[in-house]
Amino acid sequence: MDAILLQILNGLDKGSAYALIALGLTLIFGTLGVVNFAHGALFMIGAFCAVTLQRILTLSTITIDETQKDFLGNPLKVKTPYVESWFGPETGAAIIDWSVPLAILFAIPVMLLIGYVMERGLIKHFYKRPHADQILVTFGLAIVLQEIIKAFYGANPIPTGAPAAFRGSFDFGSMFGFDPNTIIYPYWRMVYFAFAAVIIGGVFAFLRYTTFGMVVRAGMADRETVELLGINIDRRFTIMFGVAAAVAGLAGVMYAPINSPNYHMGMDFLVLSFVVVVVGGMGSLPGAVLAGFLLGILEAFASMNEIKAIFPGIDQIIIYLVAIIIILTRPRGLMGRPGVMEE
Amino acid sequence: MGILEVKNVNKRFGGLQALGDVNLSVAENTVHAIIGPNGAGKSTLLNCLIGKLIPDTGSVLFDGESVLGRKPFEICQMGISRVFQTPEIFGELSVLENMMIPIFAKRDGAFRMQALSSTAGERDVLEQAEHMLESLNMADKRHMHSAAMSRGDKRRLEIGMCLSQNPRLLLLDEPTAGMARADTNNTIDLLKQIKDERDITIAIIEHDMHVVFSLAERITVLAQGSPLVEDTPEKIKGHPKVREAYLGETA
Amino acid sequence: MFGLNQKDTRLFLIVAAMTLLAPFILNPFPEGTAMAQMFNAGYPDLMQRFVIFGILVIGFNILFGLTGYLSFGHAAFLGVGSYAAVWMFKLVGMNVVPAILLSMVVAGLFALLIGYVSLRRSGIYFSILTLAFAQMSYNLAYSVLGNPASNFNLTNGETGLQLLLDDPRVLGESVTADGSIPVTNFFGIAMRDSFNLEIGGWLFTFNAGYYLAGIIMLISFYISIRIFRSPFGMMLRAVKSNQQRMNYTGLSSRPYTLAAFVISGIYAGLAGGLLSSMDPLAGAERMHWTASGEIVIMAILGGVGTLIGPILGAGFNEYFKNILSKINDEVLHQWLSFMPDGLENAFVGVLHFFVGKGWHLSLGLLFMMVIIFLPGGLVEGGQRLARLFRRRRPSDDDSQKSAQSTPAE
Amino acid sequence: MSKSNFTRRGLLKTSGIAGAGLALPTIFTASSAAAFTNEPTGSTVTLGFNVPQSGPYADEGADELRAYKLAVEHLNGGGDGGMMNTFSSKVLQGNGVLGKKVEFVTGDTQTKSDAARASAKSMIEKDGAVMITGGSSSGVAIAVQGLCQEAGVIFMAGLTHSNDTTGKDKKANGFRHFFNGYMSAAALAPVLESMYGNDRKAYHLTADYTWGWTQEESIAAATEAMGWETVEKVRTPLAATDFSSYIGPVMNSGADVLVLNHYGGNMVNSLTNAVQFGLRDKQVNGKNFEIVVPLYSRLMAKGAGENVKGILGSTNWHWSLTDEGSKTFVKSFGEKYGFPPSQAAHTCYVQTLLYADAVERAGSFNPCAVAEALEGYEFDGLGNGPTLYRAEDHQCFKDVLVVRGKENPTSEFDLLEVVEVTPRAQVEYAPDHPMFAGGSLGSCNPGA
């Protein structure tokens, strides 16, 4: 029982990341009709927003410490971050410590801008092209983006820690009356789940309760009619692309403390999030979120020793297996509409 | 006994009775029109005839054989050809190729692996297709991209493709919908010509009364999912029930 | 000729000539020069890759180009074919013929299975089904099916399936007289045998393996032309164009798509078998989704649905992949040594990001350029060039137009 | 008609044949002119450096490449000579190898066995490389080693830690300086015992591929021998990026030590996740919960950041060693590149020197002669103390370092501290040890 609860927690967490990326992919697909293979790269760039801010905050003055030696035996160069010399060592250290949450503020304008430039500069020209061309050009863009990041930051993962206040884990086990330590869960992962819930809720509320959102939803359902009403749906769709990029980017920022960001993390997520989108049903936002959590939880369960003992290697293939079963039993995924991407 | 027999067909969608106790008999070598106001169940009935929908009860027999539950290509191979509301042709293929495909289908059945023989070497199929195009007055367009043609020409080609298989029953679903007057008249002329030249049964679902009364030999009026009357065009014109349900407003 | 029309015959003869003369064409620079060091591609391994990936993409194009079904898991068949061939070398003997035949059979059966299930869906749902099957195959091949410690080591996991000295090879020898693993051969002609022709400063290498693969590629290409021009090919294009009409014309589209899927799977298996014949080690990475993606890239780069496109796309991709990754700063300095020092360093500093470890970046940019500016792929590029030249002479645009509905070469 | 098994182009580069440019075509045979594959006949010799330049191990590959370039510089008489000064053999003069200037070509393994073989083939067939070296994973090393055996060139393995490289997949033309899973385990076990006691319950998380399996087998055997109990061995997919669902159950199992048989990105993530779950703050069975990472590298430690503090593992070499060889190497590498070398850089540098030295001693580039010169060769002064290249399996035997993540690093490179230098005698094993059994070297292949 405790093991199952634990895996549900793990699944919710994995699911949060899948759902956030799939949500953005579906927004772009639903509004613009574009299959965006560069979406994983946007997630990765988000994570590197956190890395970049951390680097900016730790820009340092260099002083020579004669008492210590570096690896060549020369006097050691000691770095003191500017923020520490400006705000005092304690406040400065606290600011650096909180660099990941602060990076949210940094990432939003950056991601909106990247989204805007991407849509106006490239994606716009591909609305009328076949989906295969869209996939290929955005895949090419994804390679280019990740290679640029690699050229600047290297291929090695870069540790980007959560604020000290969120390190460590919470013991659900003792809270629910199980043995202590049986269900422990890191604070930051709980923050991530809550954050994902807020973003998902925010996107849905935005689409449902704002006029802007209503126009976009109407445009998703029937673009021509909305255009006939004299509404400039293109401009709104461009903005939605920016929003989708921002959602992916924020998912990336908050993910940085969970796993050290590296340049190929976007590709690692890309295929899985596409599977999630399709299992959810092309063009369905609730479907994407539902499928994200469903696959996250199933993946967590498949990694349990008890289950692996019965089906060796099941954790390697569970997502794909489930995807195949769902697509075969439900022709358009969990919540897809007919006629979308079926030709 | 007609070539197409619809017996006691019922179809519900949730709470909506789309078809209620439909009985219909289409006699061989006649032109039979099915008309009715919007929402009368024409499309549902058509979908039952071509196997796309399976009625809750009742049967649909073509030449004594049930069509229910059969796949579209099987129904076609039985001798029923279908013309769609918007012309369905192979847009990316040339007009000649469009015409060859049904001839191949007629000759070789639903699937035949001829991966290494040359299309250009299929003399008999080519000849038949050329001949068909000539009779449609489309021979000069044979190498055109079929998607580039006018709507009337596409319709002409589609009907020609159906005819090339010598079907026993031709099902037309609002064949002139959305067409200009001239194209509509051309299509009517073509259908008349077909009726005169061939032994073929035509079932037509139509909105346009001009088309219906130019072609049909018998007419079934559908209202609220059930046949109201079935008779010759002359009788239908004067029928009080029809006037009330339908023609009253439009005629 | 050969049952092809005049235009196709000409195309086929051009491809045949290029394939047979490739050792000359690919080595335009004299040996020992800086240009030769990087740009010459006439060495056996790369030449083999050109034609083998050509076969793979020709097959993929029969499915994707004609029916429009985008398989995102095609690399699985390549991988299965490779494994089958290596198993043949391990168990039976080093002749490549049975190995290649077995790879085609195994890949065909595997394609039949996956195609039968996946073709129940269309569009992106089909793509994701094929992707899921391929990723499952890859993951299992990499780990569970490749554990050397277990009794069921089908793939040898990370290292890849390789030949060992103690393999049985019932129809051949396990170990050669000098204590090595025997080499793959075609009735005695070793695949790695080459002979070198030296003319002036130029060196041309003629490799047995390349010529075997090249001839098989020509046969595959010939078959693909026949398929394109056959009633079957027309039906496949009909599937892409309008499935609804096709079904209501009395044709069942499923067996057609399945046949196309299996044929392209057999092509992929053949390519895999050839890869293993040239270099008898089969790695699981061949089945990774990025490998499948690369097949799609090559097909679209060349020009989807065209006859020659797959060969151009495969050649373009393999050439740049191999060449760009081998250029390093030292080579750049050597090339640019004619410049003043400051300028040279500046150029090297910039180019540094695009070669060697940055080759992915260049390749990504190249893909984007082709897709953005040449929607019809390299074939369209060629047509534009041809038109540019033709404009000077009285144009024959009408014949051009009338031919449009048949696939361009 | 003439035949050659692998074409050789290096031959033509400087041989003056170009002068006969307009002469009649001559068909010549490589095999009649050469005794072995890519025999260098001009004034230069070409080595092939095959390292991961793209993919997750690109940074490690870049460090290997730096070391190779440094080694070439030193062999050609440039720089300060590096470890050539401390090497016990003195035949290298800084005038190239056998008087030929050393040149090199580079390739990208992508950490995929297919791509690595293609890249190695291109260096052999096109560039005339007479020796291939490099790599950053065991799968690649074994695959390329097999290729070099077939082609008839020497393979000097880079970073490869699987027992199989010199175990069941060993080859006559292949040589490994780096240590292996068995040696890691043999070096670690006594330290683990003295630090954590001999009554421990270990839980293994293992990357689900060849290297992971051999490492798990080695560590489990060594720790069980000293009294530990192995509670569970769990395989994790190589593609996994988030290990939370594997780490969660650890605390449930009653284990008090977690062994992470992961490398590279897998290790960075699994260790980060384990620390995130607070495992290191827990008490189990009345003992502090501990985490062990059997194979460490500085780049991985850098990726995992603060999470490595206090975590034990083993490494082949570390820049903080104070023997003369290590100090000289760190100095010449550090002055050229601005930071200390990694263990991957060290092993690659040493392999290049060892190869050059063996050629000098053999007086020939012939792979068979070189192999003979390397087999059973005893040397010193290259950073790991007295070392033996064992003839039976082409594995180097030398001291192994047990290291621990440093609590108070003074710089971004100062992440590990050496806990113990385990002497060579303690990590030696018989060539027919069951973990290395099966397979045989075969006979050396000179190609041609």
Image (cartoon, helix red, strand yellow):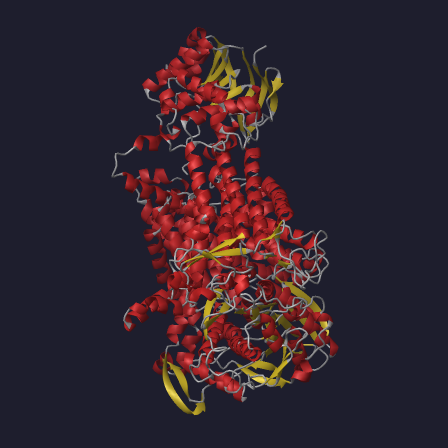
Q: Residue furthest top?
A: B234
Q: How many discs appear? A: 0
Q: Is residue B158 above or below residue A326?
A: above
Question: In the rendering, at what x and y percent does residue D359 appear?
Answer: 55, 76
Residue drawn at 38 percent across, 75 percent down:
A57
Quadrant for the N terminus of chain A in the image: bottom right
Nearest the camera: B107 or A150? B107
Q: Residue furthest bottom?
A: A67
Q: Is residue C220 above or below residue B84?
A: below
Question: In the rendering, at what x and y percent does residue D291 appear?
Answer: 62, 75
Nearest the camera: D395 or A36? D395
Whether residue A181 is visible, yes or no, is: no
- In the picture, measured across the screen, residue C400 lies left or right of residue C108, that is left
Nearest the camera: A341 or D131? D131
Question: In the rendering, at what x and y percent does residue D29 appear?
Answer: 52, 60
Nearest the camera: A106 or D15? D15
Whether residue C27 is visible, yes or no, is: yes
Q: Quadrant of residue B192?
A: top left
Question: In the rendering, at what x and y percent does residue D358 appear?
Answer: 56, 78
Residue drawn at 54 percent across, 36 percent down:
C257
Q: Quadrant of residue D317?
A: bottom right
